[in-house]
Image (cartoon, rainbow, N blue to C red):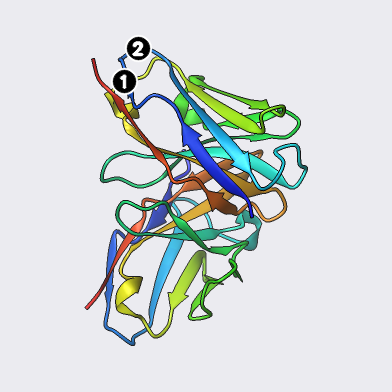
Amino acid sequence: QTVVTQEPSFSVSPGGTVTLTCGLSSGSVSTSYYPSWYQQTPGQPPRTLVYSTNTRSSGVPDRFSGSILGNKAALTITGAQADDESDYHCVLYMGSGIWVFGGGTKLTVL
Amino acid sequence: QLQLQESGPGLVKPSETLSLTCTVSGGSINSINYYWGWIRQPPGKGLEWIGNIFYTGSSYPNPSLKGRVTMSLDTSKNQFSLKLSFVTAADTAVYYCVEVDSSYYGMDVWGQGTTVTVSS
């Protein structure tokens, strides 16, 4: 069974840059997996940040960017702010109408 | 602007069937541009994709849910629905309905979520 991997937690200093990744237990992530990224704060539904690897959703600031880095999808946050402290989820499209989420990354800004 | 709203019972007994409906406003579910999907989040855990349904009625359930998932569309009411049978405590979660772009496979619009507890 395919497992999508994310760092369980990460921390970044205010104003700093952090890159979160989304990988596969077996194989490499490519644009063909249409990786997308979602931000979630407690008690709220997820908010779409990036889809199709690197397309920002409407209203998302350009300090959030998506890419493929090596064999993983990546979400880079530049100029981290206090309200970026959230859970970040990635999901990959496996084809044949099947999606798989990663376990999520808890980002701390301190 | 597309909006989604989940509705359904907040409490379901073990072994029974969980039934949820998502009402779509600001757009038609009878569109080639979207899949309509369900995602859940158990307390304190990550997101789990449950399944999607296309405007044609073709459905794509998560294989890990072992045939317990049924999805349907009601175009007259602009709604889509989820049934999850033989529930256990492990099915306790916040359930979200979502719109998924059929070109870019991103989950564009999310409902606010509804909490379902499985307990006797």
Q: Residues within 10 Å of mark 1 (few under 14, many from 20)?
A: some
When the figure is inspected, residue A51 is found, relative to residue A43, above or below; the finding is: below
x then y, percent, for residue B54: 69, 35
> Picture quarter containing residue A59?
bottom right
Question: Quick one: SS at disc 2?
Answer: loop
Q: Residue at 48% x, 36% y: name it.
A: B6
When the figure is inspected, residue B3 is found, relative to residue A97, above or below; the finding is: below
The answer to which of B115 and B62 lies nearer the viewer is B115
Q: Residue at 70% x, 48% y: name it.
A: B102
> Picture quarter containing residue A83?
bottom left
Give me the chain letter of mark 2: B
The answer to which of B55 and A94 lies nearer the viewer is B55
Q: CA distance from mark 1 to mark 2?
A: 6 Å
**Residue tagged 2:** B15
Residue B99 appears left or right of A8: right
Residue B14 appears left or right of B68: left
Q: Residue at 78% x, 43% y: name it.
A: B32
When the figure is inspected, residue A66 is found, relative to residue A24, above or below; the finding is: below
> Picture quarter containing residue A66?
bottom right
**Residue tagged 1:** B88
Amino acid found under the numbered disc labelled 2: Ser
